[in-house]
Amino acid sequence: MIQFKNVSMSYETNQVFEDLNLNISRGEVFGLLGPNGAGKSTIMHLLSGFLQASSGTVLLNEKDVVKNSLLSKNNLGFVPQDIALYEDFSAIENLRFFGSLYGLKGNVLTERISELLALIGLESRKNDLIKTYSGGMKRRINIAVALLHNPSVVLMDEPTVGIDPQSRNRIFEIIEKLQQRGTTVVYSTHYMEEVERLCTQIAIIDKGRILAKGTLKELLSTASKTDQIAISFQNRISDFKLKLPVDFHWEEEILLLNCNKNEDLTSVLNALNLIGVKIANIDFLQPNLEQLFMELTGTNLRD
Amino acid sequence: MIRIIATKDIKLFLKDKKGVLLTFLLPILMITLFAFAFGGIGKSNSKIAKIKLIISTEHQTKELTDFIHKLATVSQLELIDKPLEEGLNLVKKGTNVAQLVLGMDTISTSGKSVIKYQLFVDASKRIQIGFLEGLLQQQIMEGKMAGFFEEKFAGMPVNLKNKIEKDVNDTFQTSGLELISVTKNATDKDHLGLVQAVVGTAIMMLLFSIVAIGGGLLDEKENGTFKRLITAPIKPIDLLFGKLLMSVCVSVFQLFVMFLFAWIAFDLHIFKSVPSLLAMIFCTAFAVSSFGVFLVSIVKTRQQLSGISTLIIMTMSALGGSMIPLFIMPAFMQKIAVVSLNYWGIQGFYDIFWRNLSFVDILPRMLVLIGIGGVMLLISIPLFKKNIQQLA
């Protein structure tokens, strides 16, 4: 459905992408996971027609989005990272205006607006000015605007930045409903847990390169074979006392080890026994995307 | 699509109550201020201020006394009797425009005594001096002529002498330099100062308003709505034309309100030619709106807009006659004025309100304004497209 073919993109002297290739199938919730500045928004902008690639082609339904700009835009709903709403308009005025840009009018537009206000749970505030809304409510209207024309592809550029858990859950529910209807969603974020919960396909991206791509299961299976073990203690121990034969670090008062549980755990337990600490619990942690990202890039996802 | 964008912008504009108030109230305040300054009027019954002329005499003779009495009857003058030195000081300080010093002189060939006239002036008040000079010359010549008849036709019957004197005056004096207005129905109410004040201020304030409206586009860039508009299925250039349409609508309305105010407050006859007025309002609104669009296309931030627009508008307004009437300016400045948008707008409205020209006669000025607007739009389009790319 969506294809990036050998796409290169640069701003003046800054090369954002070089020969980017990416395929996104119909009905997927495709997650772009990467830190700030990785190139997630640029992918969104290239797809939405806001930017043009320096070379290569971006296809939507096998049609070049630049050459078929108006057609592509009609099939796309874009949720920008900023809250792109008119603060001095009410929710309904915003929805009416943006709907009219997509040729919606009369009863069709009115019904669509009612449907979306119900979906985002803001029917009772529809006549209030946007400037009186909370951040989370604005985010929900921001999404509703992108869904007005029933697009087959929805681009969501970090739609949950800076909002409360209630609004975040509401947004997750919206995305899940879109998926049920067969809408393709391209979702960019640097929140690992969002991608794990929502996305059927994930691309890990950093510095304009796609480092890994697949389902959550596929990606985790590529993580290294070292295990992460969390050990908690009954008594406090000093860091300087600790000399272990494996990599370790503390997270508050929990000791995290990166080792092979079959080969290294015994020697670690022996070392701990020697300094006289009492172990309260040992957990074998499942590998996650954060760990994978660190392995791929050597940096933390939120660095 | 352009209409939808323009409607949205008009709604946004109307929601900004302070902005709307400033768009209409500030120009009205400025028009009032300049109308008093250049127009010299409040309501229709206001009079032109009299020139306060200091009179000093070096001698006391019947001829001098008669001349001063005659001068006192001139309604445009207010005579102030002062000693020579004191009068000169007042003129030097700028308190009074001029001092007329009268004395007696003797012609060497005939030994005859004649009045000597010396006018000491404050050179910075050129318009008043010119007016005063004209008045005095007229009075002096009439006085000389009366003296001539008194002397040469002393024995002639009074009726006959007066008739001949009147005929000579009519033929050689007053009719010799009669000031005739070239306008068809010029009245005090429509004098140049008032037209200048209203039109000059209206166009200058319109330029400022349009820049503020155009700044809305920059706000949209900053708050992200512009990005959303670009990703909607509309041509980017429609956004520019939508903004232009909105600006033209607001400008037409603003100019109309300003002229309506001038009509109500100062009795400026704005309805002399309604078609010409409406066409001129539209052409001015188009040119000014295009100028606003041009400015918005070349700047990237509000700060840039504020700096560049103030510089350009103040320069254009000063050159084009919005701040200082063109007829006061030196000839070379009047030639330069044609580069200013204000000039063409002001001259076009002069043609309607003061010169009473026909629609066809005013048409060239309208076409120039449309041309200026068109050129600015043509320049704005590629700049705007480039600006969109840079926005990303």
Image (cartoon, coloured by chain):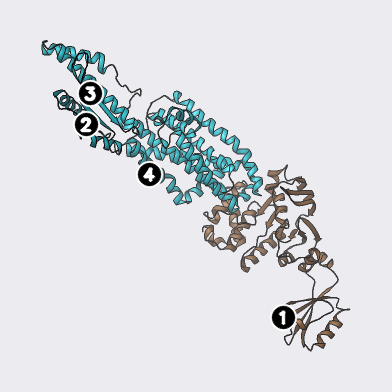
Task: Please name which of the two marks, 4 or 3, marks the residue nearer to the observer.
Answer: 3
Identity, as a three-letter code, of the amino acid under mark 3: Lys
Q: Nearer the viewer, residue B145 or B63?
A: B63
Q: Residue A64, image x and y in percent?
A: 75, 45
Q: CA distance from mark 4 to mark 3?
A: 48 Å
Task: Please name which of the two marks, 3 or 1, marks the residue nearer to the observer.
Answer: 3
Q: CA distance from mark 1 to mark 2?
A: 103 Å
Would you say residue B234 is visible in this rendering?
A: no
**Kind of element beneath mark 4:** helix
Chain rendered brown: A
Q: Which disc is residue B116 wearing? A: 3
**Kind of element beneath mark 3:** strand
State the residue position of label 2. B55
Classify mark 2: residues with Cα within 10 Å, few (<14), some (14-19) or many (20+).
many
State the residue position of label 4. B29
Would you say residue B323 is visible in this rendering?
A: yes
Classify mark 1: residues with Cα within 10 Å, few (<14), some (14-19) or many (20+).
few
State the residue position of label 1. A253
